[in-house]
Image: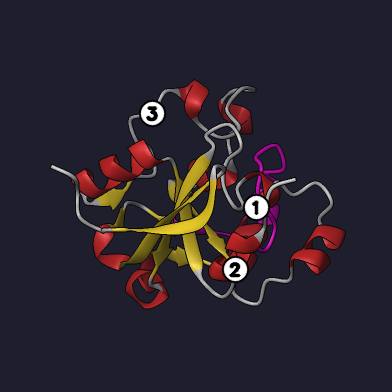
Amino acid sequence: MKDFGTLRELLGGLWHATHPIRFQSILTTGAILPEPDIDEKDRWKTSQGKECYPYVRILGGVSLFDFEGFDPVAYTQRYLISTWREFVPYRERWGCSVWIEIDRAKIAANFLSGVDVVKKWKCGNAYRHTIMPGIEAAHIGPLPSSAFKRAFVARADNGDLEQLPLLPVV
C-alpha cells in the first residue's frame, strides 16, 4: 500500500496533479490547459471513448482536487468506488506525481466547487461521465500559472516531498 503521508500536505488546499513532464509543459505554456496535447491513451478514463470521458473534461475544465475539510476515512466510506487513492500520493503507473497548489481567490471567477460539479453533473444527467464526488472541483478554461502557489513532487522511491520551482526549465 502507498504511503499517505503526502495527504497531510494536501489537506486544506486546492490542487492539480500531473506528470513531471507535463508540469514542465504547463510552465512553458503558462497555464494548465483543459485539452493539452496529450495522447488519449495517456489521459485519465478515456478507454471507453468520448461518451465516457471525465465530466470536468466535457465541461472544458481543468480537474482539481479540493481537499478543504477532507476526511479520507469518512469520504471513502461514503464513496466506496471513488478513485482518489489512485492519485494520492502519486500515480502508481508513473511512480510519481507533481502536485500544484492553486490560489482559490485568483481563480474564483472560473471555479466550480466539488458540490457545484456534482449538481451540474446530476442536472445534466451526465452519469456516464466520471467524477470524484465532492472533492473534484473544476476551473473552466485554461488555468493560468499566475494562480499557482507552489508545487512539489511525490515519488515512490523517496518519501520526502521535493519542492519545485514555478519557472520553466530552459
Residue 56, above or below 138: above
Is 132 included in the stretch rendered in magenta?
Answer: yes
Circle 1 or circle 3, nearest the eye: 3
Q: Are marks 1 and 2 in contact (CB under 8 Å)?
A: no
Task: Name the amino acid type tagged 1.
Answer: Trp
Q: Residues within 10 Å of mark 3 (few under 14, many from 20)?
A: few
- Pick the front one: 80 or 128: 80
Of callouts 1 and 2, which one flags the residue occurring earlier in the amino acid sequence?
2
Of callouts 1 and 3, which one flags the residue occurring earlier in the amino acid sequence?
3
Q: Which residue is mark 1?
A: 121
Q: Residues within 10 Å of mark 2 (few under 14, many from 20)?
A: many
Position of residue 4 measured from the top left corner of the image (x, y, whole percent)? 67, 58
Question: Mark on residue 38?
Answer: 3
Is 162 included in the stretch rendered in magenta?
Answer: no
Mainly helix, strand or loop, the magenta region?
Answer: loop
> Which image quarter holds the C terminus?
top left
Q: From which residue to which does the magenta span run?
A: 121-139
Of callouts 2 and 3, which one flags the residue occurring earlier in the amino acid sequence?
3
Residue 116, above or below 85: below
Circle 1 or circle 2, nearest the eye: 2
Indicate the secondary structure of the residue bearing disc 2: loop
Which residue corresponds to the image point at 57% horizontal and 27% vertical from the top-left? Answer: 46
Indicate the secondary structure of the residue bearing disc 3: loop
Tell me how far mark 1 sits from mark 2, CA to CA: 20 Å
Task: Name the amino acid type tagged 2.
Answer: Phe
Q: Are marks 1 and 3 in contact (CB under 8 Å)?
A: no
Q: Which residue is mark 2?
A: 67
Q: Residues within 10 Å of mark 1 (few under 14, many from 20)?
A: many
Task: Name the amino acid type tagged 3.
Answer: Ile
- Pick the front one: 87 or 129: 87
